[in-house]
Image (cartoon, grey):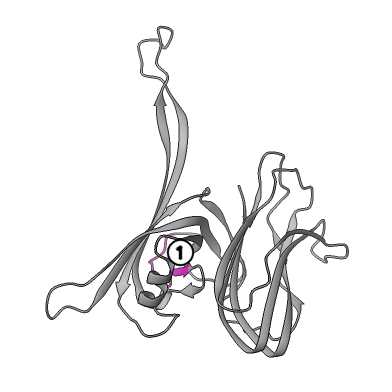
Amino acid sequence: MGKFTLLDTRLFAPGTDLSGASNKIELSSEIEDKDATNYRSGGWKEVIGGLGSAEISGEGQWEAGDPGMVDDASWADLGGTGPYTVCPTDAVVGALAYFTNGLRANYTIGDAVGELAPWSGTVKSNWPLVRGQIAHPPGLARTTTGTGTPLNLGAIPAGRRLYAALHVLSAAGTTPSLTARIESDDAAGFTSPTTRLTFAAAPGPGGQILRGDGTAVTDSYFRVAWTVTGTTPSFMFAVSLGIR
């Protein structure tokens, strides 16, 4: 990816797509530096890495009156934790995505008379910030059981983990239910898939995030698969995958 202008950045809160109500999104990640200087440090300060942290901040145009709008979603999420995914350019399959499990730490609204009503908010990380890819796009309705496009994420070395975030953005039908899982295989054809992570059944909008146990995985291809049940069910959802 070369240089580009921010025109179609995407922001997914637990069960809401806030992209259309946002005009600024910032990501930051840092490792705390701990002073390890001693008499054998050669006269220079010596530091080692300590605790890591990440933050997502956003702002944009205030809207309210529907669970999918920023005010309703922000009040519902404030003080709680869940998955947050940011895509710099778009949310098509394979698009670059950054995601984490975070605490919705604050929410601010209001400005001077005559100004377009704004909002702003911050998410503080509870898990590492993961650099990955979109495994399922948000704008594609699913009405039946199926599988997504394979992604070549590479093998997972021991000590690293597979991370996956699920954002269920809408649900329709009578008693609809979506159960998503992450599968891996050693080839793109997925002739012998292995389930690595399984999300809880989702009856409606909401978010979930999972991670592996740090065991090495030699498979290099990963995909999302899902089971849909109910009477005339229909789900819109986004999934991000990554290894860290």
Rendered residue at 54%/61% (across/down): 96
187 with respect to 201 (left or right): right
Residue 200 falls in image quadrant? bottom right
Rendered residue at 52%/55% (across/down): 100
Q: Relative to 110, say whether 49 is above or below.
A: above
Most distant residue in the right direction: 191
User: Which residues lie in the magenta part?
Assistant: 3-12
Rendered residue at 30%/76% (across/down): 61
Between residue 221 and residue 113, name the one nearer to us: 113
Q: Is residue 39 covered in magenta?
A: no
- Residue 43 position within the rendered picture, expressed as x and y whole percent measured from the top left: 35, 11
Q: Which residue is mark 1?
A: 88
Rendered residue at 46%/64% (across/down): 88
- Residue 189 position within the rendered picture, expressed as x and y whole percent measured from the top left: 83, 66
Q: Amino acid at mark 1?
A: Pro
Most distant residue in the top direction: 39
Between residue 41 and residue 70, name the one nearer to us: 70
